[in-house]
Amino acid sequence: MEKENKKVMRQVKILIILLFVWVTTSQAQNERKFIRQGNKYYESAMKETSKPDTVQFNKAEIEYRKAIEKKPNEAKWNFNLADALYKQNKFEESAEKFRDIAEKTTDKVEKSRALHNMGNSLLMNKKLDESIAAYKEALRNNPKDLDTKYNLLYAMNLKKKQQDQKKKDDQKKDKDKDKKNDQKKDQKKDQDKKNKDQQKQNQNQDKQKQQQQQQQQSKISKQDAEQMLQALENSEKKTQEKVKKVQALKAQSKNVDKDW
């Protein structure tokens, strides 16, 4: 987030140009003391070029708030406070403060500056549509402000890039979705083929089992037939033996009759 904000600040060259400190010279001693002290902290922080000195900006904010407690509606002091908030990357707070200044002032130039800086705060907070609206409103109050025109074009170009990137991302998502659907279809085909092969294999196994059972049944039937045949043969032998015995007894009876 911080790196992206630094990048935007480098590209939008006028974000710093119009964010300046208003100096007052006609307020009561205590109020002027707070403003002077706040300005010292602010100027000290601005000397640090390698990175924002948020500690000094925070001290400036505290002093500006002390002065505003004495005179809440002083536009210049509120502008100082909003500027100090912006320098601390408190973009949401600075945007609201600049908005309040723009709504209260009747001077078109001051209103344009406040709206311009509100647009800067919104831009840094990645609220592109709102920042574009603020820049446009600033230009309505001061159409010749080239800095605001530059920032407006920058914000509109940034929005277009985001829209183009979103379109590419959506297209990529659609492609990835289609690819996943194709993969699912291929997986389903592979699974269907495996299921068919497995079904065919099961059918072959069932067929083999049936054949084995039939062969087994056939063997058992042959054995039973042989046993039945053997039993018949034994029965027939027994019957013949009985017949022979009966015949023998009859023959003996006849012989006895003759002796008598």
Image (cartoon, grey):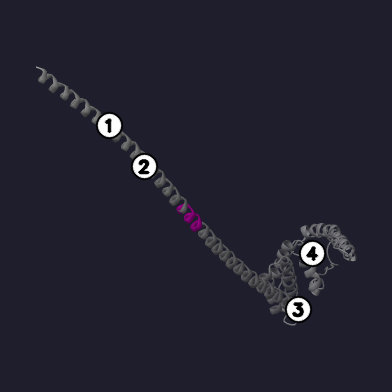
Q: CA distance from mark 4 to mark 2?
A: 94 Å
Q: Earlier in the sequence, mark 3 or mark 1?
A: 3
Label 2 is placed on what type of residue?
Lys
CB under 8 Å between discs 4 and 3: no
Looking at the rendered structure, the kind of residue marked 4 is: Lys
Mark-to-mark CA distance, 2 and 1: 22 Å
Amino acid type of disc 1?
Answer: Lys
Name the spot of residue 205 as percent of width and height, x first: 47, 51
Q: Position of residue 70 (x, y in %)?
A: 78, 58
What span is in magenta?
195-203
Q: Label for residue 3?
A: 4
* Separation of residues labelled 4 and 3 (CA atoms): 22 Å
| Image-quadrant location for residue 90 | bottom right
Disc ID at residue 222: 2
Quarter of the figure that contains the N terminus: bottom right
At label 1, counting other C-alpha atoms closer than 10 Å, the crowd grade (few under 14, some 14-19, many 20 or more) is: few
- Report which residue position mark 3 lands on: 150
Residue 27 falls in image quadrant: bottom right
* Front one among 28 and 133: 133
Q: Disc 1 designates what residue? A: 237
Front position among marks 2 and 1: 1
Q: What residue type is disc 3 on?
A: Tyr
Quick check: 250 left or right of 181? left
The answer to whether residue 183 is left or right of residue 57 is left
Chain-order first, disc 2 or disc 3: 3
Q: Is residue 106 left or right of residue 243?
A: right
Q: To which quarter of the image does residue 48 belong?
A: bottom right
Side of 42 relative to 104 (left or right): right
Hey, which residue is sitting farthest bottom in the picture? 144
Mark nearer the viewer, 4 or 3: 4
